[in-house]
Image: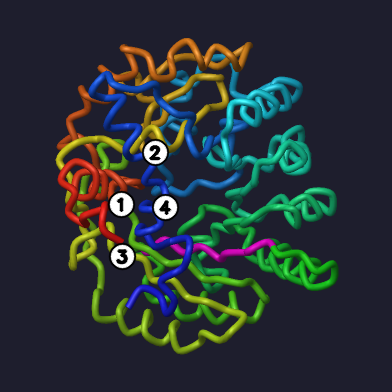
């Protein structure tokens, strides 16, 4: 069991709500339509981080190969607001302020939540919760959701996994967010995130208990993907019985105000990478824009030159020159998924193949 209510944001069946986009992508790839704007833009304001999580998908260019980013590791504040204007006008629905580092280290990005929301977009943040000041906490209250990457249930495990002794600060900050949410009546979903490693697999239930005690709305736990080339290309040896036992115990903590998501459907039963699709089809749903202004076709292949689509800097409207272009189409068609590890949106590609290309659900018959 991954969840108690299938109508949740982590259920990949959500992709079927994008059926119009699915059909449009197929038609565009065949040269029969103009590509719609992405549903979401994933924005990396800064390529710096105050932690050292070896499993982070951006650790390669944050630590070992910093030259990959180039001279601009921080998007200018004025540019990000100009970008938000463009995205809203273009028709993008969601703005996720995310990795490439720890986004809260760029204080110029703090006000983007209010600014983008005023222009009709919903906003979300990914953060390690180490740098949450009062002003930013109040901005978070206007988000649709905030992902809080903790990956531990105690100080010792946190230090081992994150490489810094910020556990007490993180616990204090998350508790403060939960208290503020209740005080002002915000509807933001605060999600305590836990990525399973051999170093923290014994700490899952303890972390879930902590999450509930702190007052967040959800606890999300999933296996880490270490099968990517940039982090060693190895399969983890996890204690699956121990993990599954803790998953069950976590689900028993659920109530009306606290939900648990043990998300494993993107992995095989041994928690190793699996692909149940044959083509890269779903990437036009999400557009990643990085701290140097570069745009890539895939959130799982940031700063990889083979996936570079173009640059959105200094003018965001440059996106319109390459989005949906022949070069964009050819780039997607050229992707060899055997070179991909865990795919964030692989289930969406699976749905496009089964539902749109093959009409496996007989869509003309409700």
Q: Where is residue 358 in the image (x, y as percent from the top left)?
A: 15, 45
Q: Does the magenta stretch include residue 83?
A: no
Q: In the rendered view, would you say 172 is above or below 113?
A: below
Q: Residue 21 carries which label?
A: 2
| Residue 282 picture quarter | top left
Q: Which of marks 2 and 3 is in front?
A: 2
| 246 on left or right of 91 | left
Please tell me the numbered disc located at residue 225: 1
Rendered image quadrant of residue 331:
top left
**Tag 3's secondary structure?**
loop
- The numbered dot on residue 19 is none
Residue 351 vertical position relative to residue 279 in the rendered view, above or below:
below
Label 3 vs 1, first from the N-terminus: 1
How far, Cα to Cα, is label 1 from label 4? Answer: 27 Å
Query: Does the CB distance between marks 3 and 1 fall below 8 Å?
Result: no
- CB under 8 Å between callouts 3 and 4? no
Q: Which of marks 2 and 3 is nearer the N terminus?
A: 2
Magenta extent:
188-196
Residue in the picture at 39% in, 76% down: 202
Kindly identify which residue carries mark 3.
264
Q: Is mark 1 on a helix, strand or loop?
A: loop
- Between 174 and 219, the residue placed more toward the observer is 219
> Badge 4, how many Cα within 10 Å: few under 14, some, many 20+?
few
Q: Element type at marker 2?
A: helix
Question: Is 194 a magenta residue?
Answer: yes
The image shows residue 297 at horizontal and vertical percentages of 38, 27
Which marked residue is nearer to the observer: mark 3 or mark 4? 4
């Amino acid at each position: 069991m991954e969840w108690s209510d299938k109508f949740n944001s982590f259920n990949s069946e959500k992709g079927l709500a994008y059926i119009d986009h699915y059909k449009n992508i197929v038609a565009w790839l065949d040269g029969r339509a103009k590509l719609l704007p992405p549903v979401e833009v994933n924005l990396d304001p800064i390529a710096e981080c105050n932690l050292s999580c070896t499993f982070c998908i951006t650790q390669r260019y944050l630590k070992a190969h910093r030259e990959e980013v180039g001279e601009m590791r921080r998007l200018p504040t004025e540019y990000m607001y100009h970008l938000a204007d463009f995205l809203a006008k273009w028709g993008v629905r969601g703005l996720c302020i995310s990795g490439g580092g720890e986004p809260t280290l760029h204080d110029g990005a703090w006000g983007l939540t209010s600014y983008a929301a005023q222009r009709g977009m919903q906003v979300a943040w990914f953060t390690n919760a180490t740098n949450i000041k009062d002003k930013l906490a109040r901005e978070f209250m206007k988000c649709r959701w905030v992902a809080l990457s903790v990956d531990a249930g105690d100080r010792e495990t946190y230090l081992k996994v994150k490489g810094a002794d910020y556990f007490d600060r993180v616990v204090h900050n998350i508790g403060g967010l939960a208290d503020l949410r209740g005080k002002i009546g915000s509807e933001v979903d605060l999600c305590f995130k836990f990525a399973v490693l051999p170093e923290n697999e014994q700490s899952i239930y303890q972390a879930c208990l902590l999450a509930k005690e702190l007052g967040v709305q959800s606890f999300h736990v999933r296996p880490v993907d270490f099968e990517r080339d940039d982090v060693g290309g190895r399969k983890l040896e996890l204690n699956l019985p121990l993990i599954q036992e803790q998953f069950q115990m976590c689900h028993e903590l659920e109530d009306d105000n606290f939900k648990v998501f043990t998300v494993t459907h993107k992995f095989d039963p041994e928690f190793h990478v699996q692909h149940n699709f044959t083509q890269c089809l779903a990437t036009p749903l999400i557009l990643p824009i990085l701290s140097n202004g570069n745009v890539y076709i895939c959130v799982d292949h940031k700063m990889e030159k083979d996936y570079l689509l173009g640059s959105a800097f200094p003018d965001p409207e440059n996106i319109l020159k390459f989005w949906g272009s022949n070069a964009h189409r050819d780039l997607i068609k050229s992707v060899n998924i055997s070179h991909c590890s865990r795919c964030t949106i692989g289930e969406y590609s699976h749905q496009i193949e089964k539902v749109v290309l093959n009409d496996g659900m007989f869509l003309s018959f409700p």
